Image (cartoon, rainbow, N blue to C red):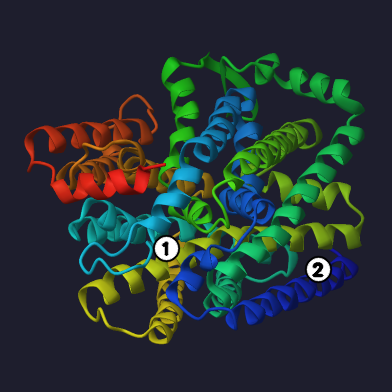
Amino acid sequence: MSTTADTSTVIVFLVYLLAVLLIGTWAYRKNTGMSDFAIGGRRLGTFVTAVSAKATDSSQWVFFGLPGAFYLSGMSNIWLIVGLTLGFYLSWRILAGRLREYSAKYSDWRSQEAGESVTLPGFFANRFHHNSLRWVSALAIIFFYVIYLGSAFIATGVIFSKIFGTSTTTGTLVGAAVVMIYSSLGGYLASSYTDVIQGFIMFFSLMILSIVAIAKVGGVGGLVNAVQAENPDLGSALAGVALVDGSWQTVSSVSFVAVVSGLAWAVGYFGSPHILARFMGMRKVESARNGARVGVFLSITLLGSAAVIGFSAIAIFGTDLANPEDAYISLVSELMPTWVAGIFLAGVLSAVMSTADSQLVVASATLTEDFYRTFMNREAPERQLIWLSRVAVLLCTAIGVVVALQGGKVLDLVGYAWAGFGASFGPVLLAALYSRRTTWFGALLSIIAGGATVALYRQFDTIGLYELIPGFIAGLLGLWIGNRFGPKQNAAVTGSFDVVTAK
């Protein structure tokens, strides 16, 4: 890329860096307790919550993994988009309002003092009156977030190497450092408000590039003709196409397993702590209804644009694209003027950070609230907990960088962590919000069975089934077994549930 592009990229990146640091500094003064650091003191409105949730959910994999998947195998990936859009909508309709209300009402079950649940493990412990749920769910969060953070830092390394000419290692380290600084300063508030900026960057970057790419190939008809010229089955949702030996070949029909695996991404929303934290941090329960509408619009727009970019890469580059996950970056370099290309690529770098910052805040709050405060120093002052959370951000960043330096495909790492969260927490969260009879042992067994199944399933899979499916089923089975054969329900648990759910 030319010097002009490099200069514009540096300028845009520095402006963005200044903006997020200012937001972090502003939010720093508003963090007076763990509720502020972990969920923003439950003060965010519908629009900020919805945009932040979608930006957190759709970051590096929308720019890298999803266009790459469409470039490799075409419309068969549409099932993933359908599953994600459906899951985002259902999570708002089924979970958001109740989780916001119940997490605010459930106090510390040990002391019965007035308070609230500010982390997902804390909510589980207070809901079922058992601290085993707190540390087991906290361990699952840390384990899968390390993998998720690794995927985000891999993406920062790739972008830095493309636009600044650095090594991917340098890019990984610099990007991780930026996210660490503003996340540790401002916590949830900084993460949420920077996510709004990043959400707009993502929306306009993907939309504009899609429109320019379509115009380049002669409109929608030109795009369709160019893709079909490579292989007509690239446009079929039921044809299995693969890039083999320099051409796209139809290798099979899309199997029932593949369709179900794509749709199964929906239930990942039911257990993803960085999404659920947005629900817990809403100002009011009524935000859930409008948030669902905003979220679905953003989901269809963002994911649909990513699909168009993947197809456009086929039409423009043919089989010459060395790395399918470079489809977005390659199109920007090919189609945009040099100074605009710098803005688009620097914008992607900021968008990648939108997921990492939320994950860092959730992981650090979990370490502080659900390990240190619960098991080591229950009387720790709020100010001390906030500073320990900032130290935990540094620790989680370092571990995520180590994972990133091991390499891997962005979408593959994201899919694995997404499955882990959905299977570990999806069944038990649904039970916590809707089932009066669920016991602490059933909830515990569900978390262990779901998470362990995801962690181990790839070692035995022979049919290509997404590990979220057997993991979620194992979580449901563990819930039933624990409720049926484990210790009987505590009357205090059902009593508190009746109080919280009373209209």
Residue 230 screen position, x and y as percent: 73, 21
* The N terminus, quarter of image: bottom right
**Number of marks in the image?**
2
Q: What residue did someone put label 2 on?
A: 9
Q: CA distance from mark 1 to mark 2?
A: 27 Å
> Which numbered disc, 1 or 2, marks the residue that appears first in the sequence?
2
Rendering coords of residue 237 (x, y %): 60, 18
Residue 311 appears left or right of 58: right
The amino acid marked with disc number 2 is Thr
Q: Which residue corresponds to the image point at 7% horizontal and 43% vertical from the top-left?
A: 487
Task: Please name the residue shown 65% across and 60% down the image.
Answer: 195
Left or right of 58? Residue 266 is left
User: Callout 1: helix, strand or loop?
Assistant: helix
Residue 475 appears in the picture as rendered: yes
Which residue is at the front of the view, 472 or 249? 472
Image disc number at residue 403 = 1
Residue 364 position (above or below residue 409)? below
Residue situated in front as seen by the camera: 460 or 88: 88
Q: Amino acid at mark 1?
A: Val
* Horizontal arrangement in the rendering, residue 212 relative to residue 369 (left or right): right
Of 190 and 125, which appears nearest the observer? 125
